[in-house]
Image: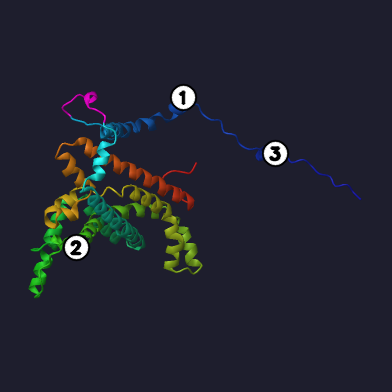
Amino acid sequence: MAAIQTSSPPAASRAAARPIVKRKRTVGQRLRHDWPLLLMTVPALAQLALFFYWPSSWNIIAFMDYSPYRSFWENPFVGFAWFERLFADPYFVPALLNTLKYSFANLLFLFPLSIALALLMHSVVSTKLRSVFQSIVYLPYFFSWVLVVTIFVQVLGADGMVSNWLIGFGGDRLDIMSDPSTFTFLAWLQWAWKDAGWGMIIFLAALASINPSLYEAAAVDGASRWRRMWHITLPGIRPVIVLLLILHIGNILSVGFEQYQLQREAVGYQTTEVLDTFVYYRAIQTAQYSFGTAAGLFKGVIGLVLILVANKVAHRLGEQGIYQKS
């Protein structure tokens, strides 16, 4: 029997099989290489330091009996006394419940609306029609809440356009702007008109990153439009959906101030009192800055806990979340 001769792999194959080891650059080398990029981040870091980190350091006054007319170190520490007073305040729990109600309404209805608008925009073939539709939907995001509420009063108010139409046809006067029972629906209409365009732009950017060849291959295989959307579009934007959902959950105790303050007299403070207006009337107007800081710190801690929990759930479901799992 003839012996089987084996030859060793050539030198090029052996070299290709070796793992490539990258040399780590030192800190000095990275600084010399990336200094233009680091220089561009200086304005953003300065803004964060001046308007976020420095004010955040003053959260310590939530544990002090603070007065701006005393030296900082002359303000005595009182521990959790302001938090005990916050939780015992009779207006705190109603404000918290209103905040949660409006936040969940925003999360359950406005968030899917932004996704639906982005999918609708993405399916429009005409570039000109898409640009017009995008401008119409996105423009109200730049309006102030004063202008938004004024427009709604002119349209849905007791003497507004819709009421005049109903009276002209023999109907009753519309009273949606001053009816506490319909304020949640009214607030959702205002959110949808003002903020849905901003969410639509974010999801459109995510849709633009999907490879068009996936749609072409699915169409060749006979997949319908709905199946392409279900198996290609939604999985393609799922990381962005999860990221924004986590951020929305973290801001669940922050629903804003202007929208509710502007409509406070029309529907009553019991309906429009949220945590932001609660802090303004119970702390800022009465110059109880430690009390207001305690309320703000409570919101921040709850928001941080919700973000960490939601991000942990996202990791369990196989998503990246707001940061990668170590």
Find residue 13 and report its horizontal and vertical position in percent.
69, 41
In the rendered view, would you say 194 is above or below 124? above
* Amino acid type at image mark 2: Ser
Residue 268 vs residue 142, the one in the foreground: 268
**Residue 57 placement (x, y as % from top left):** 29, 31
Sequence-wise first label, 3 or 1 = 3
Q: Of the residues shown, which amino acid type is indicated by label 1? A: Gly
Q: Residue at image x 28%, y 56%?
A: 106
What percent of the width, then of the height, locates residue 318? 49, 52
Seen in the picture, residue 86 relative to 33 is either above or below; the reply is below
Tag 3 and tag 1, C-beta contact below 8 Å: no
- Could you say which disc has been placed on residue 181 in the image? 2
Instruction: Mark yes or no: residue 84 visible.
Output: yes
Q: Type of residue at label 3?
A: Arg
User: Label 3 near label 2: C-beta < 8 Å?
Assistant: no
Left or right of 164 in this view: 182: right
How packed mark 1 is, by other alpha carbons closer than 10 Å (few <14, some 14-19, many 20 or more), is: few
Segment tinted magenta in the rendering = 68-77
The label on residue 28 is: 1
